[in-house]
Each structure stands twice: as structure tokens, then as C-alpha cells.
Amino acid sequence: MKVKNIIGVLALSAVLAACGNNAQENAKTGSNETKEEISVKEDSKDQAKSSESKEDQDSQKANEENVIYASFFPIYNLTKQIAGDKFEVKSFTNLKTESHGFEPSAKEIAELSTSKLMFVNGAGMEEWEEAVKNTVDIDIVNTSEGVDLIKASEDDHDHDHEDADHDHDHEDADHDHDHEDNDHHHDHEDGEEGHEHHHHHGEFDPHTWLDPANGKAQAKVIADKLSEVDPANKDYYMANYEKIAKELDDIVTEYKDKFKNVDNKKFIVPHQAFGYLAREFDLEQIPLNSLTSTGEADAKVLKEVSDLAKAEKIKTVFYEMGGSDKEAKTLADEIGAEAKPINTLEFATDEELSSNKTYQEMIKENLEAIYDSLS
């Protein structure tokens, strides 16, 4: 009996021992599975981070390729028309403020790193161009490179109006970040009166864009460059350019015919910005200020212009749209004329921006205003 009990106890012990070993093995296996699962999860996290980093880099590269800059309003307007929905076009300068004398901050220059391409007017208009070139890796395209530029005179202004020498010779000329939200007011009474501002653009008159023939040439440069960087959409850019070119050709033809039939070819302007337009249409600008100066004209100039206007029976004195009309009104009252605005297109109003008014429309408005003043 005792022997049977002993045998039973031994058998039970063996069973319990076997169960214990199985439990330890299961525990060990469970532990190993947990480590493997943790390792897989960590690998997944690393892969996800790597994927997110690559996506961020790809996204940044795509943004750089999709954003292009234009230096100021007329170049921005033409670029936006040609680029259409293929690129996001931003203006480097505030679209609603005077672009002469603009000096970008280090932060504004750094913002250009989001793009690889910028269109500028050239001819010395963008005084900040070298600072950008020395700081940011961006392709700057000079849209006036093929334009027959007018040299600025040494004193930047010729007041000998009686000689009617208006800085060009018709027979010799062979003429072939978006800051929109910044607050800016264009009230005439708020113009900076009594202050003289000088901007040193260089040896050439920078106001190429005010001549529609030049505008057409500059638009072609933009279309060609966009076709180069995005050849898949070349037909799209060229079609947009051709539309602009046709409108500008029609404008040139219309107003050359109109100006042929006027006797007086002289028009008074706030500063010497209309040389290219005058050359194109065989007119003569009589400026109150030089290429690089804005503000009140000096007494000698006002006397000269007043005498000339009376002799030539000039009936309009233009002031810069968005600027003060005080000086123009004073001169107009003296000579029995009217003071009217003229657009240099160096900035735009809220209304012009919200209505998507085109460069072509503004150019035509200028020419019509000048024609009305002469007819």
C-alpha cells in the first residue's frame, strides 16, 4: 500500500514539473514575441519618419518649382496673364506702393528662396537686383534685354523745352510674397508734397513698359522663359502671349493713326517717365520732374513749362495717378488748363487688382488720355 502511495506521489510530481516547464517555455515565447512586435513597430515608425521627411522635401521642391516672382506691377501683370494656372505668381514689391527706390529687407530677400525664377524689368529699374543675386540662388530674367534703351542725360532732365529736344531722335531710333495685403492709401491730399525724392537707376531710362511695343517684347521674354522651364505647357504659354501681343499690336496701330492727325504733339507729365511712349508715337513729353525725382518741381521749371504751355495752347496738365494733384492744379489754373491723372503703372489700386485689370487696358487708357489732351 505504501509502495502504491509512493508511486502516486512521484507520478504527480512529474506531472507538476512538466506543467511548470511548459509554463516557463510559454512565458519565454511570449516575451520573445513581445520583443519582436516592439522591434517591428519601431522599424515602422522610422520608416514613417523617413517617408514624411522625403515627402516634406518633395513638397518644398514642388513649391519652389511652382512659385515664380515678378519685380513689380507691370511685370507681375504680364507674367500672371502668361503663366495662367500653371504657376503661382508673386510680386516682390508691394503691388500697391511706389516701386521707385524700393529697398528690400533681409527677410523679404530670404522669402525668395521659395522660388527659382524671377522676372524683372531691367534697364536699372530694380536697384536691389545685385543684393538679391548675392544672397539668393534664383534665376533673374531681364525682360527688357532686347529693348532699344533710351540713355538718361547727364543731369537726368532737360528743361530747355523751347528747343523741343526730348531725349530721343526719331530718325536715328531703330525701335524694334505677395504683398497685396499691405495697407496703402492713394489719396491726393496725402501725397508727399514739398519733398524731393531721388532714385538713381543708372545710365538708362527704366520706364520701358509704358510703350506698348516694348511691353509686347517683354511679354515674349516671359513666355519664352516659361516655355523653357516647363516645355510640356509651351503651347499654353505661347497662346497666352499671342493674345497679349495681338491686343498690343492693335493698340499701337490705332493710336499711331490717331496721333498722326493732331497738330500739337506735346503733353505735360509729372516726371520724365514717358520717353519710350513718346518715341513710339512721335510725341514730346514735357516733364515737371526728372527720371529719378518725384515731388514738387522748382520755380524755374514751372515758369518754363507755363510759358511753353501758353505758347503751344496746351490744355491738360497730367499728375501721377495715386499721387498729389496740387501742383498740376496750380499750373493748370495759371495756363487755363485742366489737371488730369495719368498712370505710370508702377503700382496698382485695390480696384485694379480686384478686377484683374490688364496691362493692355491700362496702356490703352493712358494713350486715350494723352490723345484727348492733344485733340
Image (tube, helix red, strand yellow):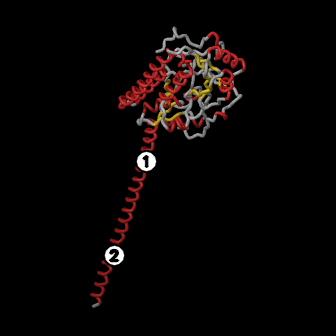
With respect to residue 353, does 211 lie above or below? above
Q: Which residue matches tag 1?
A: 52
The amino acid on which the numbered mark 1 sits, given as a three-letter code, is Glu
Q: How many marks?
A: 2
Quick one: label 2 or label 1, which is nearer the N terminus? Answer: 2
Q: Is residue 214 visible?
A: yes
Which residue occupies 56% across, 18% down? 275
Q: Which residue matches tag 2?
A: 17
With respect to residue 88, does 308 lie above or below? above
CA neighbours of label 1 inside 10 A, class few (<14), some (14 to 19), many (20+): few
With respect to residue 48, does 185 lie above or below? above
Q: Residue furthest front?
A: 336
Quadrant housing residue 223: top left
**Distance between mark 2 and mark 1 Cα atoms:** 53 Å
Assign a secondary structure to mark 1.
Answer: helix
The amino acid on which the numbered mark 2 sits, given as a three-letter code, is Ala
Where in the figure is residue 354, as x and y percent of width and height?
50, 39
The answer to whether the residues at label 2 and label 1 have Cβ atoms under 8 Å apart is no
Quadrant housing residue 160: top right
CA neighbours of label 2 inside 10 A, class few (<14), some (14 to 19), many (20+): few
Which residue occupies 41% across, 50% down? 48
Instruction: Please state, as top left, top right, bottom left or bottom right, where the C terminus lies in the image.
Output: top right
Where in the figure is residue 370, as x and y percent of width and height?
55, 22
Assign a secondary structure to mark 2.
Answer: helix
Where in the figure is residue 189, as x and y percent of width and height?
67, 34
